[in-house]
Image (tube, rainbow, N blue to C red):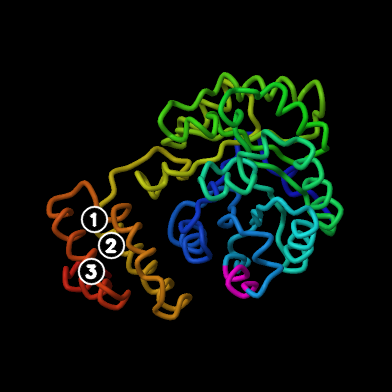
Amino acid sequence: MSNFWKKLKKGFTVLAPMENVTDHVFREIMSTALPSPDVLFTEFTAADGLNSSGRDKALKKLVFSPKQRPVVAQIWGVNPKNLGLAAKTCAELGFDGIDINMGCPDKAVLKIGAGAAMCTNPLLASECIKSVQENSGGLPVSVKTRLGFNKVIVEEWASFLLEHNLAALTIHGRTAKQMSDYPADWSYIAKVVELKNQINPNTIVIGNGDVTSYTQAIDRVKQTNVDGVMIGRGVFSNPWIFETQASQQRQPIEYFNVLKKHLELYDAFYEGKHYDVMKKFFKMYIREFEGANEIRAKLMETKTAKEGFEVIKNLDLVN
């Protein structure tokens, strides 16, 4: 099976995996209603969940459409066997790649030794990577991680990961302890690129952290020589962040029309459930224009997608 990472041009962009954000609906919006990145990631999906009575719920996170390709399934856990079985499921579902989350700083994830806690347990990390690779059905396997757990160990940690013949390695420029309280340090990401050239030139390196525009992403590529750039929270400040042309001033109606589609897709996919999660997107679409605060307040009071749509519809601005 071909490695899609190798077909991407240097300077490619990736939408970061974000829990309760990069679900099927938002990825569909990014693929059809907004400028799309070159690669999309799912939310991070628990390998244990895919191998339990909660499998159907976990599978909901792995729904995707052909428009979203190339799309990577991100999985996490500490049980190598379950991670292998999860990889097999992802391959059967037809994903383009599989990523192992070794960077999540969530306390509940860290408590069981998963996510960024893997930085402190290289033996287990190695077992997990090998299990996923062996069961990936030929899909390219990647890892997303950080500079370290509670201190920077990026040279040691990245070197260790690069020895595992990964298709791609994403480095977030902070430790887990730093969360988002400190600026991402791209000098360490540049160091990972140097290590990659020495240890495994075939591995694609992706930088992640504090990128707020497409122009800045390209600057990071030039400064650090990374192959691609992953953007996460920046999409909330600018839904058009992956637009490769010069950024232009957007009119409120453009935001409203995308929000309308988002609400419709959300309601259809979740069948009227989990509406509170949808509310986190309101600030992304309703911002920086006269009356935005009042409109957003009305949307936050709604209890269903249909009610949210009515608020927008009554503004007489949606096409």
Looking at the image, is mark 3 or mark 1 earlier in the sequence? 1
Q: Is residue 255 magenta?
A: no
Q: Are marks 2 and 3 in contact (CB under 8 Å)?
A: yes
Which residue was labeled with disc 3?
Answer: 312
Q: Is residue 297 positioned above or below 157 on the image?
A: below
How many C-alpha atoms fall within 10 Å of the one at disc 3: few (<14), some, or many (≥20)? Answer: many
Q: Tell me how far mark 3 sits from mark 1, CA to CA.
A: 11 Å
Looking at the image, is mark 2 or mark 3 earlier in the sequence? 2
Kindly state the secondary structure of the residue where label 3 is placed.
Answer: helix
Left or right, 239 with respect to 78, comes to: left
Kindly state the secondary structure of the residue where label 2 is placed.
Answer: helix
Which image quadrant is residue 319 in? bottom left
Residue at x 56%, y 44% (from the top left corner): 104
Q: Amino acid at mark 3?
A: Ile
> Overall secondary structure of the magenta stretch?
helix
How many C-alpha atoms fall within 10 Å of the one at disc 2: few (<14), some, or many (≥20)? Answer: many
Residue 70 can be seen in this image: no
Read off the magenta span: 54-60
Residue at x 76%, y 48% (from the top left corner): 141
Residue 279 can be seen in this image: yes
Q: Amino acid at mark 2?
A: Phe
Which residue was labeled with disc 1?
Answer: 252
Q: Which mark is residue 256?
A: 2
